[in-house]
């Protein structure tokens, strides 16, 4: 009698007509988008995972932008870094200085076995995150710019037929709103970004020396050098007692002031579209930022905010192939058009913008192309292509502190900007010493 050898596991599977399942390569993606935006990120990852069988992207929410960036840096030091980390725009200089930690996106995409067109991305978005030679350092993802949100119902009740286009018109509208019984004409959030960085770019004035930091580490802040910015901030502070301006906190903390119908106008990111659409029970719209017509006849262009996706070193070539394929998927016009139309972030590619036009989105939702128009209004100048300052996350905190002292009546606008510039320049020198 011949004794049969036991079947191996593989033989048993083959005998049953089954094939073994191959493990998918995981791509870890750490992000800072919670709530509805986080759900949309999950949706994009799921779409990519379902589109192929080789890779699986695992998105993980790590807290706000600062917390996410801090977690990624700590993980890298521990040798447990994700493949992709979302970093807000003011962290760009810090990421660029992190030698050995970052794998530039153009290298990831050019090395991978994919078709990739670096020129597909909107110039106003791409230039912020590129080297002087035009090589993309990180992948634009959730890019936005501040716009002026307005409550059409409140403006109509106050007899305001035209949405204010200048700061003088803003204060004239405030008087009418007050006469109609409204205690808050306008508010804003992310005040350094909206009222300093974008105000200066909008009026083609420098935020700092050396091309706002693009030309090197020796830059210094120039936010205290603009007489018209100083005068405007003082006028806003003085107007609080008249019910013109109401401060509602940093970042998006002041959203309820607008969404509840308390304030008629609100300057903040275009990316609040989804939240406002869900919360507001009044007719609302978007308009361009107001112009200070005393110093400029026409606006220059606004600058972007939001975040990009950085790739970290320390992973295998096969995993970077998966990152490249995921980035290519995210850049598809249909994916970007849906992201843009759902969230209010600008589409990162020209094709996605054109697809949104073809789909009639801007006709159905008037004003939702305001952000794109602002960014593309003119060819960016050295003053308006953005900023690249080291330690700018901490510098923004300083600016917030000084402006809050201004709103509280503890100092003048001139004192607030001078102190913010002096304290900020100290951090710029610290960054220069550490990375020069």
Image (tube, rainbow, N blue to C red):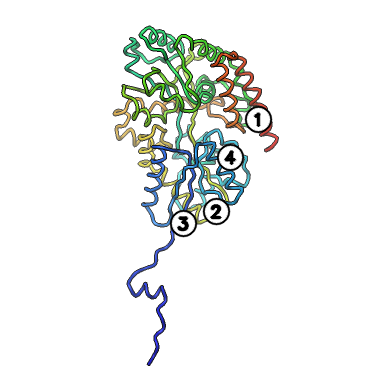
Are circles 1 and 3 on residues that touch, CB within 8 Å?
A: no
Left or right of 270? Residue 357 is left
- Within-10-Å neighbours for mark 3: few <14, some 14–19, many 20+: some
Q: Earlier in the sequence, mark 3 or mark 4?
A: 3
Discs 2, 3 touching: Cβ within 8 Å: no
Give how far apart the Cα atoms at labels 2 and 3 are.
12 Å
Kindly indicate whether the residue at mark 4 contacts the one at mark 2 (C-beta within 8 angstroms): no
SS label for mark 1: helix
Mark on residue 25? Answer: 3
Q: Earlier in the sequence, mark 1 or mark 4?
A: 4
x and y percentages locating residue 326 in the rendered image: 44, 48
Q: Position of residue 421 (x, y in %)?
A: 63, 22
Residue 269 at what x, y percent from top left?
44, 28
Indicate which disc, 1 or 3, sits on the residue closer to the N terminus. 3
Give the Cα separation between the discs numbered 3 and 4: 26 Å
Residue at figure coordinates x 56%, y 16% from the top left: 406
Q: From what the image shows, is residue 244 above or below residue 39? A: above
The residue nearer to you, when weighing 344 against 303, is 344
Q: Secondary structure at mark 3?
A: strand
Q: Looking at this view, is 125 or 167 the one in front? A: 167
First in residue order: circle 2 vs circle 3: 3
- State the image quarter where residue 427 is shown: top right
Marks counted in the figure total 4
Q: Secondary structure under badge 4?
A: helix
Q: Which mark is residue 195?
A: none
The residue under label 2 is 315
Quarter of the image with the N terminus in it:
bottom left
Could you give the CA–CA distance between mark 1 and mark 2, rounded to whole angstroms?
32 Å
Label 1 and label 4: CA atoms lie apart by: 15 Å
């Amino acid at each position: 009698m011949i004794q049969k050898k036991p079947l191996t596991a593989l033989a048993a599977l083959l005998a049953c007509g089954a094939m073994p399942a191959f493990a998918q390569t995981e791509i870890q993606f750490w992000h800072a988008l919670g709530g509805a935006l986080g759900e949309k990120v999950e949706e994009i990852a799921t779409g990519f995972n379902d589109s192929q069988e080789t890779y699986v992207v695992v998105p993980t929410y790590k807290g706000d932008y600062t917390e996410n960036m801090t977690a990624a840096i700590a993980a890298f030091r521990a040798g447990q870094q994700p493949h992709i980390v979302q970093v807000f725009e003011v962290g760009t200089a810090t990421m660029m200085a992190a030698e050995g930690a970052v794998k530039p996106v153009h290298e990831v995409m050019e090395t991978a076995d994919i078709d990739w067109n670096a020129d597909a991305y909107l110039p106003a978005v791409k230039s912020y995150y590129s080297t002087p030679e035009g090589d993309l350092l990180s992948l634009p993802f959730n890019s936005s710019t501040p716009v002026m949100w307005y409550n059409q119902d409140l403006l109509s009740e106050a007899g305001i037929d035209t949405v204010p286009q200048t700061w003088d018109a803003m204060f004239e509208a405030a008087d009418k709103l007050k006469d109609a019984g409204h205690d808050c004409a306008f508010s804003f959030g992310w005040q350094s970004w909206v009222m300093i960085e974008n105000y200066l770019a909008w009026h083609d004035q420098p935020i700092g020396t050396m091309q706002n930091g693009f030309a090197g580490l020796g830059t210094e802040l120039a936010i205290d050098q603009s007489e018209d910015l100083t005068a405007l901030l003082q006028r806003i502070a003085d107007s609080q007692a008249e019910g013109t301006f109401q401060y509602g906190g940093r970042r998006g903390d002041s959203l309820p002031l607008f969404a509840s119908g308390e304030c008629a106008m609100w300057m903040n990111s275009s990316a609040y579209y989804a939240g406002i659409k869900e919360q507001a029970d009044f007719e609302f719209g978007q308009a361009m930022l107001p112009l200070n017509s005393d110093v400029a006849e026409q606006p220059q262009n606004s600058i972007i905010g939001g975040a990009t996706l950085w790739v970290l070193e320390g992973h295998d070539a096969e995993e970077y192939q998966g990152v490249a394929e995921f980035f290519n998927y995210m850049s598809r016009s249909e994916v970007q058009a849906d992201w843009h139309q759902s969230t209010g972030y600008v589409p990162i590619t020209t094709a996605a913008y054109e697809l949104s036009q073809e789909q009639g989105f801007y006709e159905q939702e008037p004003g939702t192309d305001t952000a794109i128009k602002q960014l593309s209004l003119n060819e960016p100048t050295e003053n308006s292509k953005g900023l690249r300052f080291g330690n700018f996350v901490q510098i923004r905190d300083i600016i917030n502190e000084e402006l809050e002292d201004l709103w509280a009546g503890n100092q003048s606008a001139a004192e607030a900007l001078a102190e913010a510039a002096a304290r900020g320049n100290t951090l710029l020198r610290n960054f220069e010493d550490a990375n020069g």
